[in-house]
Image (cartoon, rainbow, N blue to C red):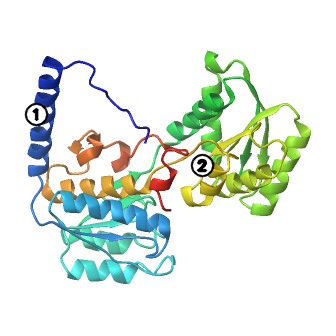
């Protein structure tokens, strides 16, 4: 996240106050962590065990479990098939885990097994990828569509100085998440501060590397005054970056969107891309672990409006249908990209 450095300008009193504030916040954090039962057994079940994104998310969960003194483990399949997670769920029920935190490979196939887990007193939290609501008590979601869409326009505006023509390079014309994000981008654009920015085209690369590459080329030819491209798809942003990296427009057309640090690192380092966004999967796993621990400790039951303490992520509130949102996406740039591996 962006580093907010607070420099202490004065000495004497401000330092004493700062010290007192630090002590009280530590004490209150300790009090809320003390509400959690000690030694909770919490198992994370990723979509597949060796996917770098999933590993980062699970590691975040294990860090949280260490913080509150639980007993955490990660078990799961090596392939992301719908039925591959079932045997792991059944084993975890037998082992009497207090909670299962799962990134579901299928919205419906796992529901009967997770229902059985809940019937036996095991708390179930989905994260990153949900089941139907009947299969779990809570769903920890990366970011809501509105904060993603609006955030993309806010970042682009910074990059192009608040004025000029820009295009969107999406996935397929019917991709639900892409279209929802684009709707929120268009909503954000209505604000007066973006009066000098103009969306000239929505292009579709169909989440295909080669087609996205060709679409980028087409945009630069069709719009010689183009100042920016937003690609809210990891395939699209990487393909567009590859095209721009050898184009005379490198450094003139600002490319941003949603991508992973590992695919975008080279393009950040060579100046093709200044900044892009995505949620931090480590924080997602961390939040899911705290949600599971609070459920298992009885401090929350999963009802809308309940809130709980999530360690370094602060107080969190449960929304509609048991959904908890991590928050706005993280912006990656030269200052922080090397801290991430997924």
Residue 276: name its quadrant.
Answer: top right
Asked whether, in this view, residue 27 is left or right of residue 276, the answer is left
Residue labelled with disc 1? 24
Q: Position of residue 258 (x, y in %)?
A: 60, 49
Above or below, 122 relative to 163: below
Kindly give the residue lying farthest to the right in the view shown.
221
**In the rendered image, the vertical position of residue 305 relative to residue 136, given as above or below:** above
Mark pair 1, 2: CA separation: 38 Å
Q: Earlier in the sequence, mark 1 or mark 2?
A: 1
Check disc 1: other Cα within 10 Å, few if <14, some if 14-19, many if 20+.
few
Does the CB distance between marks 1 and 2 fall below 8 Å?
Answer: no
**Residue occupying the far front of the picture:** 11
From the viewer's perspective, is residue 111 above or below residue 335? below
State which quadrant residue 138 falls in. Answer: bottom left
Helix, strand or loop at disc 1? helix
User: Looking at the image, which residue is at 79% across and 53% down?
Assistant: 243
Would residue 23 appear left or right of 81 to someone viewing this image?
left
- Which circle marks residue 42 in the picture? none
| Neighbour tally class for label 2: few under 14, some 14-19, many 20 plus, Cα within 10 Å | many
Residue at disc 2, secondary structure: loop
Q: Is residue 106 visible?
A: no
Check the image and report above or below for 67 versus 226: below
Residue drawn at 46 percent across, 45 percent down:
143
Give the image quarter of residue 42: bottom left
Q: Residue at x 26, y 45 (%)?
A: 312
Residue of label 2: 258
Q: Is residue 82 left or right of residue 94?
A: right
Left/right placement of residue 69 relative to residue 203 reads left
Q: Position of residue 132 (x, y in %)?
A: 43, 60
Q: Quadrant of the N terminus?
A: top left
């Amino acid at each position: 996240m962006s580093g907010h450095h607070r420099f202490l300008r004065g000495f004497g009193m401000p330092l004493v106050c700062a010290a007192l504030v630090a002590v009280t916040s530590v004490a209150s954090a300790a009090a809320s962590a003390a509400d959690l039962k000690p030694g909770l057994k919490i198992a994370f079940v990723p979509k597949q065990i060796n996917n770098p994104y999933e590993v980062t998310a699970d590691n975040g969960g294990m860090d949280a479990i260490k913080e509150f003194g639980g007993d955490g483990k990660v078990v799961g399949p090596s392939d992301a098939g719908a039925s591959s997670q079932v045997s792991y769920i059944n084993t975890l029920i037998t082992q009497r885990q207090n909670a299962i935190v799962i990134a579901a490979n299928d919205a419906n196939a796992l529901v009967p097994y997770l229902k059985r887990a809940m019937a036996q007193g095991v708390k179930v939290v989905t994260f990153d990828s949900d089941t139907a609501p009947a299969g779990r008590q809570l769903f920890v979601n990366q970011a809501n569509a509105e904060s993603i869409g609006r955030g993309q326009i806010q970042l682009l505006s910074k990059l192009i100085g608040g004025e000029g023509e820009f295009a969107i390079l999406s996935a397929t014309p019917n991709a639900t998440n892409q279209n929802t994000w684009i709707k929120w981008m268009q909503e954000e654009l209505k604000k007066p501060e973006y009066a000098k920015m103009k969306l000239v085209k929505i292009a579709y690369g169909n989440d295909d590397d080669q087609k996205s590459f060709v679409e980028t080329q087409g945009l630069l030819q069709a719009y010689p005054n183009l100042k920016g491209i937003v690609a809210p798809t990891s395939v699209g942003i990487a393909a567009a970056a590859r095209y721009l990296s050898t184009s005379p427009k490198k450094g003139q057309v600002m490319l941003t969107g949603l991508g992973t640090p590992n695919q975008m690192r080279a393009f950040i380092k060579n100046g093709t891309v200044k900044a892009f966004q995505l949620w931090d999967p480590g924080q997602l796993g961390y939040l899911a672990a705290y949600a599971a621990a609070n459920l298992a400790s009885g401090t929350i039951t999963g009802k809308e409006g309940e809130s709980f303490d999530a360690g370094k992520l602060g107080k969190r509130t449960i929304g509609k249908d048991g959904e908890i949102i991590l928050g706005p996406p993280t912006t990656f740039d030269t200052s922080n990209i090397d801290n991430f591996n997924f």
